[in-house]
Amino acid sequence: MSDPRAEARQASGLTAPAPARVRYALVPVPRLSLATVARRSGLHPDLVRRFVALGLVDAERDAAGRLVFDPAAPAALARIQRLRSGLCLNYASIGLVLDLLDRISLLEAALRGRGTRRETPPWT
């Protein structure tokens, strides 16, 4: 026997959304602490916190509320420092340049993955 109320809700589009699927990592993702990232990048922890606040470096909070970073964070910080010292950019400009460089990388990857092979080489 079917439930008429459930059928009415389904017909009217008022059904509850499907429960969210929970995903569990098979291997824990290594995270770096603020002190480790600061030591590996050669920067003061306060400067690393400032970069996080400006959105130049991604970080998350652990259960205790401390900042934890992806293992690639020291390389991102080195990139920021190269832009700052090499091009004399301010932090707002660095954010813009980083966004543009990431966009260029995505476009180049899309072109490589597009499979633009031809039967005849382009130089003939």
Image: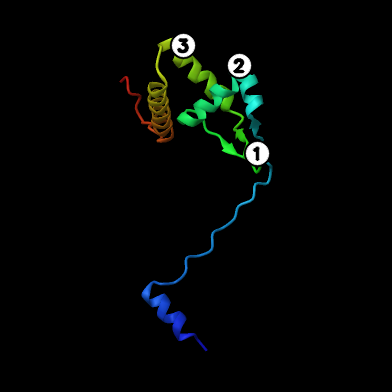
**Most foreground residue, 56 or 109:** 56
Residue 67 location (% of width, % of height): 60, 34
Residue 87 location (% of width, % of height): 41, 12
Disc 3 or disc 1, which is closer to the eye? 3
Does the CB distance between marks 2 and 1 fall below 8 Å? no
In the rendered view, would you say 35 is above or below 64?
A: above
Find numbered disc 1 in the image and state the secondary structure of the residue it sits on: loop
In the rendered view, would you say 4 is above or below 54?
A: below
In the rendered view, would you say 23 is above or below 115?
A: below
Q: CA distance from mark 3 to mark 1?
A: 32 Å
Residue 53 location (% of width, % of height): 49, 31
59 with respect to 8 (left or right): right
Q: Residues within 10 Å of mark 3 (few under 14, many from 20)?
A: few
Q: CA distance from mark 3 to mark 2?
A: 14 Å
Q: Earlier in the sequence, mark 3 or mark 2?
A: 2
Q: Earlier in the sequence, mark 3 or mark 1?
A: 1
Does the CB distance between marks 3 and 2 fall below 8 Å? no
Q: Residues within 10 Å of mark 2 (few under 14, many from 20)?
A: few
Find numbered disc 2 in the image and state the secondary structure of the residue it sits on: loop
Quarter residue 34 falls in: top right
Pointer 1: what residue?
29
List the single residue furthest toward the left.
124
Pointer 2: what residue?
42
**Number of dots carrying numbers:** 3
Residue 92 location (% of width, % of height): 39, 24
Q: As shown in the figure, which amino acid type bears the numbered disc 1?
A: Val
Q: Residues within 10 Å of mark 1 (few under 14, many from 20)?
A: few
Q: As shown in the figure, which amino acid type bears the numbered disc 3?
A: Ser
Pointer 3: what residue?
85
**Most foreground residue, 70 or 50:** 50
List the single residue furthest toward the right.
27
What residue is shown at x 61% (from left), y 16% (from top)?
42
